[in-house]
Amino acid sequence: MSIQSPPLLLLCLTLFISTTLYASTNIDQAKDKFVDEMAEKHGFDHKALQQMMAQVEFRQSIINAMNRPAEAKPWRDYRPIFVTNSRAKQGIEFWQANEKLLNAAEEKYGVPPEIIVAIIGVETRYGRNTGSYPILDALATLAFGYPKRAKFFRSELEHYLLLTREENISPTEKKGSYAGAMGKPQFISSSYRSYAIDFDNDGIRDLWDSNADIIGSVANYFKRHGWRRGDPITMAAIGAGKQHQDLFDLGMKPKTEIGKLSARGISSNWTLPTSALSSLILLEGKEGDEYWLGLHNFYVITRYNHSNLYAMAVFQLSQKIIELRHD
C-alpha cells in the first residue's frame, strides 16, 4: 500500500490543480466576454472596464454564504435572529428620529411606518450592518463563479455598473452583502435602479446615508408591488393542520378563497370577505407547528425577499415595535 500511495496522492493533486486552472480560465473568459458586451451595449470604456474587472477578487466566502442562507433555517431558529426586544427598541429610536418622513411616506404610498421600520431593522439593524463585501467582488464572484445562479447575478452586475454610472458612485468603493445588496434597505442593483427614489429632492438617490430616500424607496417598492393601504397582512389559521397539506403545497401566492378555507375547517379571529384570497403557511415553531393565513400584503412583503420566514419576521418585528412603543 505504501508503494501505491504516492502515485495516488500525485493523481489527486494533479486533478485538483487541473480543475482549479480550468475554473480560473472559465472565469477569466466569462469576465472578458462580459467586458466586451458592456462596452458594445452600453458604451463603457473597454480598456478601463477590463482593468477594473481584472482587479476583482474571487471570494470563496461569498459562495459559502450563498450555500447557507438564513432562510434555510426552521422558523424556531430564524425568528430569534430578527424578532428581538433590542431590534424593536432600535426600531422605536429610528421611528422617533424619522417620524415626519415615515408619515409622509405612508400618506403618499399607503405603507404603514411600522412595516417600513421593520424592513430596515431586519435588513441592517437600521444601518448598523450594511455588509462588508465589496459589491463589485460579490456580484462578479456570483456572476462568473456560481453557475447555479450565474445568469441572475450577471444581470445584477450589469445593473450595478449602470447604477454607479448613473448615480456617480465609485463601483470599487461601495460595500454590501455577500449577494451584492446595498445600503440600509439592502436593495439589489436592479431594484435600486427601478424603485429607489429621491425623497428629499436633493437630486441624488442615496440608500446609504439619506433616511428620506431610504424610507421613501422602501415605501415605493411596496407600492409598486401592489401594497393595499389599510389591508391586513396575516393572522393565525385556526383549525389548520397536516390534513391540509395540499393547501400548503400551493405556494406563497394567495390562491385560495377564504370561503373555501372555511369549508375545509380553517378560520381566523378576523372577519374577512369570503372571496378574499389567501395562502396557507406552515412554520416550524419553538412550541410546535404554526399555521398562518398569508393575505395579499403578506405576499407583497415576500417580493422583497422571497421567503415566508422573512415576511413573518418583518410582520412580527413590526408588531413588537408597536407593542413596545405603546408601553
Image (cartoon, rainbow, N blue to C red):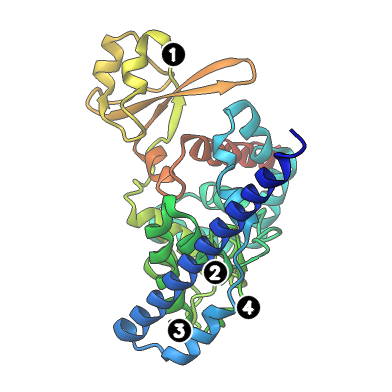
Q: Which residue is mark 2?
A: 212
Nearer the camera: disc 1 or disc 4: 4
- Name the disc covering residue 258, or none: none
The amino acid at mark 3 is Arg
Q: Give how far apart the Cα atoms at labels 1 and 4 are.
A: 51 Å
Instruction: Please determine whether, in this image, residue 244 is positioned above or below residue 300.
Output: above
Of mark 3 and mark 1, the one earlier in the sequence is 3
Q: Which residue is mark 3?
A: 165
Say left or right for 122 vs 240.
right
Q: Give how far apart the Cα atoms at labels 2 and 3 are.
A: 22 Å
Q: How many numbered discs, if any?
A: 4
Say left or right for 113 vs 37.
right
Q: Secondary structure at mark 1?
A: loop
The amino acid at mark 1 is Ile
Res 300 → quadrant: top left
**Residue in the picture at 45% in, 77% down:** 161
Q: Which residue is mark 4?
A: 173
Q: Which residue is mark 1?
A: 238
The amino acid at mark 4 is Glu
Q: Secondary structure at mark 3?
A: helix
Instruction: Please determine whether, in this image, residue 69 is positioned above or below residue 79.
Output: below
Nearer the camera: disc 2 or disc 3: 3
Of mark 4 and mark 2, the one earlier in the sequence is 4
Residue 115: x and y, percent? 52, 47
